[in-house]
Image (spheres, rainbow, N blue to C red):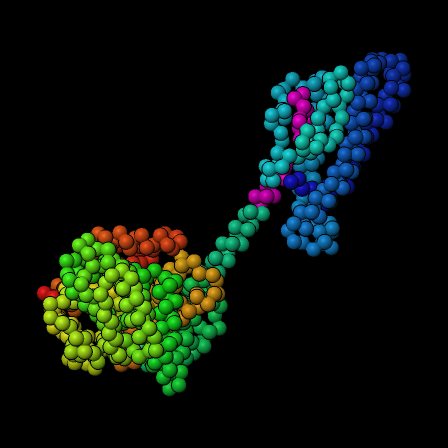
């Protein structure tokens, strides 16, 4: 779309007035031809006089065209402003027209070029190739629409006219005057560059804000580690005044600020609620369910563990699965169906023992699983074991029968047993692993966070958690969650509770003591287990799972027989399998 400068009509009228003076000059020259001849100047012939008349006609039509163009450009500016959402009282002003204008120098250059074209070659048509032909309409390079153009009358008329041609009309193949220029590239380029500069400045400001926020968080964590609660409190107050960066960084920072505040004011009732955050079983189950439904991490855990259990149960007639955290029983329908379809037929008996806190839906979960097993012709038994902590469960409670193949499944549970009262005091994890070893299981599947949030120093633990959960929140962007939806808020709350427990709690109250895969390897080998390789089928199914999520940020990788799921280059969760040595 063409744009005109707000001063161009007045300036060009002056130019046209100068051009129009050519008519008076030509008439004066004609009336004085006889006197010129008497003074020795050769008289003008009729061809030159006719040429002067043509120039005068062109000048008159240029003036009319400019007046029409002024009206058209004003109307186009108002339409453009209306499309852009500019109020009508602003779009009609000269300032609004100037926002969509090209410089008068471009327009004057166009007019001067046409005058030169008219006066060239002693009034003859140019012999150059036509600028616009029938099969090449002139298009605006920014809008893609056909522009008003000028066309010629038949050669026999020996006259040139300027008039508007509708966009559906074919252009003459005769030599024509050059069309009006498109919007000046310099101005468009300047606007684009200005937008880029503004965008870069905004990104730089956000980056600086994020860096300042991270430095302040680490300074506060350092003050907490040194016991300087006065400086820590001052730093938290300063952090709360900082502008929160947009996106995942701002969200994760808010959770860490809250956790630091709770830790500094540890005498308040808020912290006592945080330390016992698992006491509300209904809320825990709700957050766990939405985290499972929304993110790939728990699905990855269930899928890889089920595949390993299915392969370990190959050929077994009586199988017994012990689940350390039954929750909603979401993991087991897939395994029941896979056992029903395995080569050689389903097992004669499938037993499932689910451990967990008391909740009203426990029996309902068992009944639904039993109905599913019956529909695929599998003999099924379900038994629930109520326990708030895994170390409260004794081997006799599990009622393992002789001759049955046992699989023990733990998804994000064993790290809760790592607390110890001292360096020489055994942790609860040691007793639990020895009890599992006594069951002589065919397989033990373990899924844990790929992180180290169990370091003795608070600052190192805080720094590791900040990096880990920043990546975790970043990965949520690929989960196709509507912004500010209830699903998104519940998933963020699920992760926020882990952050609060890692940062705000100590001692026995801190249960989120995540350790990485290498640390679990050493612990399992020391306890008497040997590793099992997670096969190619588990890897293939895990990669297929990621096709359900947008983007290509999620990564499944093999790590010495184990599988990890991460975001880009950072592993976030690890799945491994073990057996009785």
Q: Is residue 219 above or below residue 184?
A: below
Percent of width and height locating residue 357: 29, 78
Residue 493 visible in image:
yes
| Side of 557 where 180 appears, left or right | right
Residue 131 visible in image:
no
> Looking at the image, which residue is at 36% across and 62% down?
295
Q: Which residues are magenta?
A: 170-190
> Looking at the image, which residue is at 11% across and 67% down?
403
In depth, the one of 41 and 135 nearer the eye is 135
Residue lying farthest to the left in this orientation: 581
Question: Does the magenta run of residues contain 142?
Answer: no
Tell how many labels: 0
Question: Does the magenta run of residues contain 189?
Answer: yes
> Looking at the image, which residue is at 14% across and 67% down?
404
Mainly helix, strand or loop, the magenta region?
A: loop
| Side of 465 where 380 appears, left or right | left
Snapshot quadrant of residue 129 = top right
In which quadrant of the rendered image does the C terminus lie? bottom left
In depth, the one of 87 and 35 nearer the eye is 87
In depth, the one of 549 and 520 nearer the eye is 549
Percent of width and height locating residue 46: 83, 14
| Side of 579 where 132 appears, left or right | right
Q: Is residue 486 above or below residue 138?
A: below
Percent of width and height locating residue 167: 67, 33
| Side of 61 where 269 appears, left or right | left
Snapshot quadrant of residue 170 = top right
In which quadrant of the rendered image does the N terminus lie? top right
> Looking at the image, which residue is at 67% across and 47% down?
80
In depth, the one of 324 and 478 nearer the eye is 324
Percent of width and height locating residue 312: 17, 60
């Amino acid at each position: 779309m063409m744009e005109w400068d707000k001063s161009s009509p007045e300036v060009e009228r002056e130019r046209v007035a100068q051009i129009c003076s050519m008519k008076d000059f030509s008439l004066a020259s004609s009336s004085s031809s006889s006197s010129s001849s008497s003074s020795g100047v050769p008289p003008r012939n009729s061809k030159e006089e006719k040429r002067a008349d043509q120039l005068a006609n062109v000048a008159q039509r240029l003036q009319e065209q400019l007046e029409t163009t002024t009206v058209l450009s004003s109307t186009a500016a108002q339409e453009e402003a209306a499309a852009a959402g500019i109020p009508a009282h602003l779009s009609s002003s000269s300032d609004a027209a100037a926002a969509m204008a090209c410089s008068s120098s471009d327009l004057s250059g166009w007019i001067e070029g046409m005058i030169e074209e008219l006066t060239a070659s002693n009034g003859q048509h140019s012999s150059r190739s036509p600028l616009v032909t029938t099969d090449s309409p002139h298009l605006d390079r920014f809008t893609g629409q056909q522009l008003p153009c000028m066309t010629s009358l038949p050669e026999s008329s020996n006259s040139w006219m300027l008039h508007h041609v509708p966009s559906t009309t074919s252009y003459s193949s005769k030599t024509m005057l050059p069309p009006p220029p498109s919007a000046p590239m310099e101005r468009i380029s300047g606007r684009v560059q200005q937008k880029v500069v503004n965008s870069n400045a905004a990104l730089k400001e956000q980056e600086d804000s994020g860096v300042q926020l991270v430095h302040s968080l680490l300074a506060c964590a350092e003050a907490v580690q040194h016991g300087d609660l006065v400086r820590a409190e001052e730093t938290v107050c300063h952090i709360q005044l900082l502008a929160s960066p947009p996106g995942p960084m701002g969200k994760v920072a808010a959770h860490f600020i809250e956790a630091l505040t709770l830790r500094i004011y540890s005498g308040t009732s808020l912290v006592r609620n945080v330390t016992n955050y698992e006491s509300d079983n209904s809320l825990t189950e709700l957050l766990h369910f939405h985290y499972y439904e929304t993110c790939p991490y728990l699905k990855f855990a269930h899928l890889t563990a089920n595949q390993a259990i299915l392969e370990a149960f190959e050929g077994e007639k009586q199988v017994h699965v012990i689940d350390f955290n039954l929750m909603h029983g979401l993991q087991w329908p897939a395994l029941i169906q896979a056992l029903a379809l395995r080569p050689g037929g389903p097992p004669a008996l499938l037993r499932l023992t689910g451990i967990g806190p008391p909740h009203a839906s426990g029996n309902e979960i068992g009944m639904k699983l039993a109905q599913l097993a019956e529909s695929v012709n599998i003999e099924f038994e379900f038994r629930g074991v109520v326990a708030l902590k895994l170390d409260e469960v004794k081997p006799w409670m599990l009622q393992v029968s002789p001759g049955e193949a046992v699989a023990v499944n733990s998804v994000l549970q064993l790290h809760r047993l790592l607390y110890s009262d001292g360096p020489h005091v055994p942790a609860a994890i040691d007793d639990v692993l020895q009890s599992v070893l006594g069951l002589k299981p065919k397989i033990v599947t373990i899924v844990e966070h790929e992180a180290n949030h169990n370091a003795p120093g608070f600052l190192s633990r805080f720094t590791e958690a900040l990096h880990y959960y920043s990546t975790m929140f970043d990965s949520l962007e690929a989960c196709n969650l509507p912004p500010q939806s209830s699903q998104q808020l519940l998933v963020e709350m699920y992760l926020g509770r882990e952050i609060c427990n890692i940062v705000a709690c100590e001692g026995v109250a801190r249960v989120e003591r995540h350790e990485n895969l290498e640390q679990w390897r050493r612990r399992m080998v020391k306890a008497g287990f040997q590793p099992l390789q997670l096969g190619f089928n588990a890897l293939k199914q895990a990669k297929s799972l990621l096709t359900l999520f947008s983007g290509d940020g999620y990564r499944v990788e093999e790590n010495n027989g184990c599988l990890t799921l991460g975001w880009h280059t950072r592993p976030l969760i690890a799945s491994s399998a073990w057996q009785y040595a």
